[in-house]
Amino acid sequence: MNKSSNTFWHPASVTRQDRQKLNGHSGTILWFTGLSGSGKSTLAHAVEEKLYQRQCRTTVLDGDNVRHGLCGDLSFSGEDRTENIRRIGQVACLFVDAGMIVLTAFISPFRIDRQRVRMMVTKAEDFIEIYCDCPLEICEQRDIKGLYQRARKGEIADFTGISSPYEAPANADLIVDTGTAAVDQCVKQVIEFLEGRGMIEKI
């Protein structure tokens, strides 16, 4: 992994373990991936609400929001998509080190990019890949922004699912049927998964 020259890692006097003890839960990345319109952002924010009610320390990194600032200089080319995910991965790792649960909602269409983020974390279990499984036709029906329609007309280049591929996870940690299941049901599935992993207490 590249790093700037003439820089040295400065260890923190307050450790990740200290922060997790204060927070009352472990830090982790919940990486929601899926097509545009598959319900990633909706589910991520709904899960965060449930975790907040349990007094968990959380934050959501949303694809569109991040491109308003941190990644505002990037296009949607394959190369820039990879850089987009790399930056998000680095930011997410900082939140994990702070002992927080960070929920990310990005299409992140390429398996290799998601795998690179998994490799960034200290422990493999710190990265939970959640596949929002929703058929393309349902995603298009939900498309209130009209992006799919524009992509099919050729007005948007490199649009995932139309002119650019989406590589579904081969071994997702959790698959959620966001195409037909209600949001509450999907949230319940994610929360029960975290409880089963011992990442949050069962109530």
Image (cartoon, grey):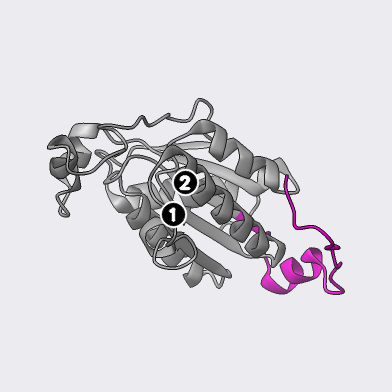
State which region is magenta. Answer: 1-28
Left or right: 13 as drawn, with respect to 45: right
Dot 1: few (<14), some (14–19), or many (≥20) neighbours within 10 Å?
A: some
Q: Is residue 20 magenta?
A: yes
The residue that label 2 is drawn on is 80
* Residue type, mark 1 in image: Leu
For the N terminus, the image quarter is: top right
Q: Nearer the viewer, residue 155 or 46?
A: 155
Q: Secondary structure at mark 1?
A: loop
Is 10 above or below relative to 126?
below
User: 17 or 65, which lies in front?
Assistant: 65
Gap in angstroms between the C-alphas marked 2 and 1: 6 Å
Q: Main secondary structure of the magenta part?
A: loop
Q: For residue 74, which numbered disc appears in the image?
A: 1
In the rendered image, which quarter contains the C terminus? bottom right
Reply above or below: 102 against 53: above
| Rendered location of residue 125, percent (x, y) | 67, 43
Q: Residues within 10 Å of mark 2 (few under 14, many from 20)?
A: some
- Residue at (75%, 58%) from the top-left corner? 4
Give the image location of residue 154, x and y in percent.
17, 37
Count of numbered circles in the view: 2
> Which residue appears at 45% of the width and 68% of the height?
69
Q: Secondary structure at mark 2?
A: helix
The reply to whether the C-beta atoms of the residues labelled 2 and 1 are less than 8 Å apart is yes
Q: Amino acid at mark 2?
A: Asp
Q: Is residue 129 magenta?
A: no
